[in-house]
Amino acid sequence: MVYQPQLARDGSVRSASPPAPVQSSAMRRRIRSAAFPLRRHSIPQIAVDGALVALAYWLAYRLRFDGPSAVPERFQDLFDATIVPVVAGSMLAFAAFGLYAKWWRYVTQRDYLRIVQAVAGTIRR
């Protein structure tokens, strides 16, 4: 944007300078928080979600093989090798769909749709 000199009412010429940027501490905080989508209150939510995903994965193995003693050795090794990537992948998918970027006291239909999309995106056949 080019700033042209302006005429005052008395006929004198004054130069127009660009407006000084106004940036409060709240605005800087908001800009910083936009770069990092996780909020302070979402850390316990992430921990609970991780525990629930791990529990669901463990229960799926136990139900599939009818109890903990019936899991064959190779499938137990597979479970041990895949539990961390499954939980981490689910947490990344939930964060990518914006489930941790909102205060969940007020939930709308659009939020329910986002939850269904995030869960459906983490399920593999």
Image: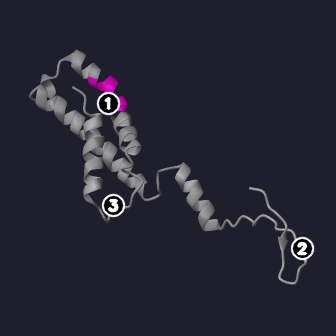
In terms of depth relative to the viewer, which is nearer, 91 or 63? 91
Q: Provide the residue designation for mark 3.
A: 104
Q: Which residue is mark 1?
A: 83
Magenta part, dominant SS: helix
Task: Tell me what residue is drawn at x 25 percent, y 53 percent.
Answer: 112
Check residue 75 for magenta coloring: no
Residue at point 30%, 44% (across, down): 51
Residue located beneath label 2 in the image: 13
Q: Amino acid at mark 3?
A: Trp
Q: Is residue 124 shown above or below 102?
A: above
Q: For mark 1, give the secondary structure.
A: helix
- Mark 3 surroundings within 10 Å by alpha-carbon count, few (fewer than 14), some (14 through 19), many (20 or more): few
Q: Would residue 79 be found to the left or right of residue 23 on screen? A: left
Disc 2, SS: strand
Quadrant housing residue 58: top left
| Residue 59 coordinates in the image, percent (x, y) | 18, 36
In-image side of 100 versus 59 (left or right): right
Whole-angstrom CA distance, mark 2 to mark 3, is 56 Å
Placement of the C terminus among the 4 image quadrants: top left
Is residue 96 depicted above or below 109 in this figure? above
Kind of residue at disc 2:
Val
The x and y percentages for residue 107 are: 29, 61
Magenta extent: 79-86
What is the secondary structure assignment of the residue under circle 3?
A: loop
